[in-house]
Image: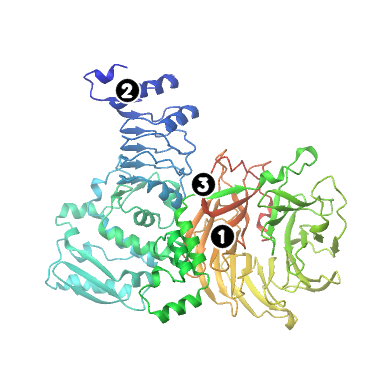
Amino acid sequence: MAIDSSDIDAVDVLNESPCNLNEELLISLLRAINLKLRVVDLQDMPLKEDFLWDLCHYGLACKVLNLRSSHIRKLNMAGKFMRLQTLNLDFCTSITSLHQDCFSCMPNLMQVSMCETRVADLWTTTAALSKLPSLVELRFQNCLCCKDTGPCPASFGKKENTALDTLGSATGFTPKLSLDSIGVGPIQASRDDELYSNLFAAANTFNIKEVYGGMDKLTFASEAKTSNCLQRIGLLVLSSSVLPDNDNETKLRNENYNSHHPSTICFEKHYREYLIASLPHLEVLDNLSIGDMDREMAKIVFSEYFERAPYNRPHKEKVVSILQNREIGAAGAYWLNFSKAKRQCLRRKSPSFFARSLSATKLVSVGWPLLHPLSSSFSQIHKEGNKTLRPRQFEYHPSDSRLMAFGTLDGEVVVINHENGKVVGYVPSTGAMNSILGLCWLKMHPSKLLAGSDNGCLKLFDINHMPPKVSDLNYATGVVCFDDFEPLTSVHINATDDQFLASGYSKDVALYDINTRRRIQLFTNMHREPINVAKFAHHSPFLFATSSFDRDIKLWDLRQKPEQPCYIASSSRGNVMVCFSPDDQYLLVSAVDNEVKQLLADDGRVHMNFEIASTGSAHNYTRSYYINGRDYIISGSCDENVVHVCCAQTGRRLRDVYLEDIESGNSLFVQSLRGDPYRPFQMSVLAASKRPSSKCEIIKVNLLTCNYSANECSSSEQHIRSSCGLGG
């Protein structure tokens, strides 16, 4: 306690030998040393969770903190670390995400290393790191020869090639043009034949029209027919000031970067460019220095593949300004340079301009979306043996924004008010229905709900006659039964509520008449393999699409007595899902392992190919739906714990939402999902964990409301049954 008045300049606490540690005394010691504390090295120590929580919650006065290989499950360093400059979290394999306040009290933190962690979310990770005003060195993987976060000594001059390599990855071509190919020393004004032959060879490969030479720079001007990436580049300048001018540096520059101990986030496509574009003050990433060319290339790649704000808003707007412009009738700051006639034309074409502006502003301000499970609502329903409900399929109500219906793995049908959590109606399983794989509300008769189970049982319920409690068994009133269709995976009702389709694990599709309660027709051999989903158009009662594991999507017209499809569109893998856009202009097709495309509904041509990374799994069943009308799409797969949000018109990724059980740290995998038809940038996800005797969970996701609270997300684990690849 007398250390403050002593001649000791600094104290380092190092773990260099195994010992039986009294953690309570250690934390007291660290705080007693206080401002004389310089380095705290706790790597590879078997620290208990309580000690780590106490350390992170109250903070330390050290400058260097090494927690390498610690068992920190949730990084939430909310304590005061005012003097901390270096933080090492390498090999903390329990860390899967960063809390929104984990770096809030670290104004002097300059170096962060998180090699071989399980952090995967680009968006929340960047939002957390952006709160560090002094951060200049970051590492999620390291060069093989480097132990610290700084630039690798062997990579000097390599940063110039990094941008060119990125250019190749962005265009689908690995460029052979390197700095060596255009000379070792500074580029001179003289037109060396060998230099320009290399440049023109590269120009032909990139379809570049002209190459200009100057005293200090070379400029590549792109043709109109080049790729989008090259069109956005404009002028790519190689300055002589960044070129090394001796053979030793050239040799070092040509050595390949040896990535070592990568975190999960490193496998995210374009992750380096995303971080560089999002953290403008960063100087070193993964032991590679960040140069001007890297920053320019990062901006290009970011604008090509990512959307910083919804609806292509280039800047963050103030909510007050948007509301003021709405009241006075102004069109917004983006149109100030347009003529009055042009401004009025744009305003007429976009009646939802202000609503989109408001949602865009709110989403940009939210780093951690709100995830709220509906399991608390299920506690009202008490089953025999204290068993819990296990949702398998769900649908929003077509006209009442409060209601949602879901069917369970045990054949129950439940209608809940998902806003207040109250159960509106409940129908227990009578043994006739197994897992509910198909649900569809009637539009013109919104009190009625069609449900189909995997054993082929089809019933039409009236929620006005559904009891809200299990004990009330008088649920037979208003129930209509139809002929079985076995095995069933999907049901869908047409726009006029008079017919519905049933499809399943067969090559046939059945058409039913709701009024007569009879099957009208059975269309046989519509595909070469089982038809997972059949969907009617939203506005035409005659058009419907089918998706099959035979890799084909087919559009049919009932007026032509479906013998031949209107057209056939194919995927490279088996199709899991198809649905029409709300205006029936597009078809959204989801094939196995993240192959997601948007087709023109008129003729089946590919309008947009969403480049979502595949996992290599043949059982990674992918489902996609529209959100915000047809402006955006959401996509998730049963072998992954992430929901992708992409722009339907550009294909750029707006946001990824990762699902994780906060209490156990287990990942939750996407079984089904739906966009909220009434609220922008909100959705619900049916998630489960790949563990036996676990629960299924419907999680509401609000991208416009912040705070991922551990208290709001309960443990959610579910054993995945074989039906995870069936139905929508």
* Colouring mode (rainbow / by chain / secondary structure / one colour): rainbow
Spatial CA distance of label 3 from label 1 is 22 Å
Spatial CA distance of label 1 from label 2 is 52 Å
| Foreground of the two, 106 or 572 | 106
Q: Position of residue 531 (x, y in %)?
A: 69, 67
| Foreground of the two, 654 or 417 | 417
Which quarter of the figure has residue 456? Answer: bottom right
**Neighbour class for label 1 at 10 Å: few (<14), some, many (≥20)?**
many
x 39%, y 33%: residue: 67
Q: In screen coordinates, is 335 left or right of 595? A: left
First-in-chain label (3 vs 2): 2
Which residue does the numbered mark 3 point to in the structure image? 707
Do the numbered discs 3 and 2 sit on residues whose CB atoms are within 8 Å? no
Q: Nearer the viewer, mark 3 or mark 2?
A: 3
| Foreground of the two, 62 or 572 | 62
Which residue does the numbered mark 2 point to in the structure image? 33
* Res. 411 visible in picture: no
Tag shown at residue 635? 1
Mark 1: amino acid: Ser
